Image (cartoon, helix red, strand yellow):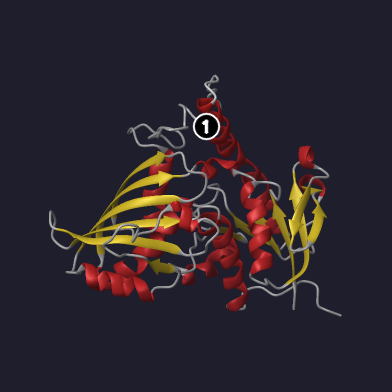
Amino acid sequence: MGFKVAVVGATGNVGREMLNILEERGFPISEIVPLASRRSLGSEVSFGDKTLKTRVLDTYDFSDTDLVLMSAGGNVSKEWSPRIGKQGCVVIDNSSAFRYDPDVPLIVPEVNPDAISGFTRKNIIANPNCSTAQMLVALKPLHDAATIKRVVVSTYQSVSGAGKEGMDELFTQTRAVFVADTVDVKKFTKRIAFNVIPHIDVFMEDGTTKEEWKMVAETKKMLDPKIKVTATCVRVPVFIGHSEAINLEFEKPITADEAREILREAPGCLVIDKHEDGGYATPIESAGEDATYISRIREDSTVDNGLNIWVVSDNLRKGAALNTVQIAELLIERGLITPKQKAA
């Protein structure tokens, strides 16, 4: 039993990663269709050992397609996802366009799989923000064990979160610094090479950025609306892999050893926490990996029932493409979709 799957935004960083992960995980596919904008017409992408030519989104007929993995940005998704959903095709959207819509489930399979059944209202499922996704994989088992009251998180987010242009800017600026050339700033608000920028997405009226607001709103929607969350999101000169320093306050007592054992058994988590040089995860180790790495687990004596943890993950995978494919797998596992075209 195979499904006809289309990937919208197939030429982008996340779109290409979606194709890689579908092939890696042996997703049951009868046909795969890479879609992109007219300016990318004829571009080629890889799927396993095959090379596929992209097709144009605005002339494609979705009526016989089962699943669409959408990674073309919020504006494209707002226009196309509802239209595709009305054709009986399920859209898993990687943008922020529908994350806060009460009729669209926002899903991390390790965190809130039961919420997926709500997709039938619009045939759209939202993928959370990359920084929220990895954080909640780590927080869910701890919340189940001791009930989280408050989260204080500082992120260290790689430039790949800003797309190919962000990665290109870090590369060209770094090269310019080494050869004493002019450092041009285009994608980011300040120079990113050998620098950090405490600003991701637009500023809001209260002084937070949209990225920080997303972490608050998405945590409440997926994990628990009673949790208090405050975030500071920072762009750092790393190509792939987001890192997070997370301070947690619980309702019930929990020790660092208890948390360590809980996280070792939790789905999607990999604990690397030795109290020695190099006994922790960094973005380099996370790149190309599926796991959410958790390190530096320790008690915070400044509050009752407090813990500190360090969380690292490949933002292109668990933060985007992998989570999208896992959502599609969850739909199949629960029998929520079947192929439109039956095998001969």
Task: Say which residue appears at 82% left-offset and 78% top-offset.
Answer: 343
User: Amino acid under label 1?
Assistant: Thr
Q: Secondary structure at mark 1?
A: helix
Please determine whether, in this image, residue 61 is positioned above or below residue 251: above
Which quadrant is home to the C terminus?
bottom right
Closest to the observer: 218 or 123? 218
Task: Say which residue appears at 29% left-offset and 70% top-offset.
Answer: 260
Closest to the observer: 311 or 37? 311
Please determine whether, in this image, residue 68 is positioned above or below residue 155: below
- Quarter of the rendering containing residue 276: bottom left
- Quarter of the rendering containing residue 112: bottom left
Closest to the observer: 215 or 234? 234
Most extreme residue toward the top is: 182
Please determine whether, in this image, residue 81 is positioned above or below residue 32: above
Task: Say which residue appears at 44% left-offset and 50% top-offset.
Answer: 242
Q: Judge left or right: residue 304 versus residue 195.
A: left
Please determine whether, in this image, residue 233 is positioned above or below residue 301: above
Most extreme residue toward the right is: 344
Q: Judge left or right: residue 318 versus residue 83.
A: left
Closest to the observer: 21 or 192? 192
Query: Residue 213, image x and y in percent?
Result: 39, 44
Query: Residue 307, image x and y in percent?
Result: 22, 60
Which quadrant is home to the N terminus?
bottom right
Which residue in the structure is indicated by mark 1? 174
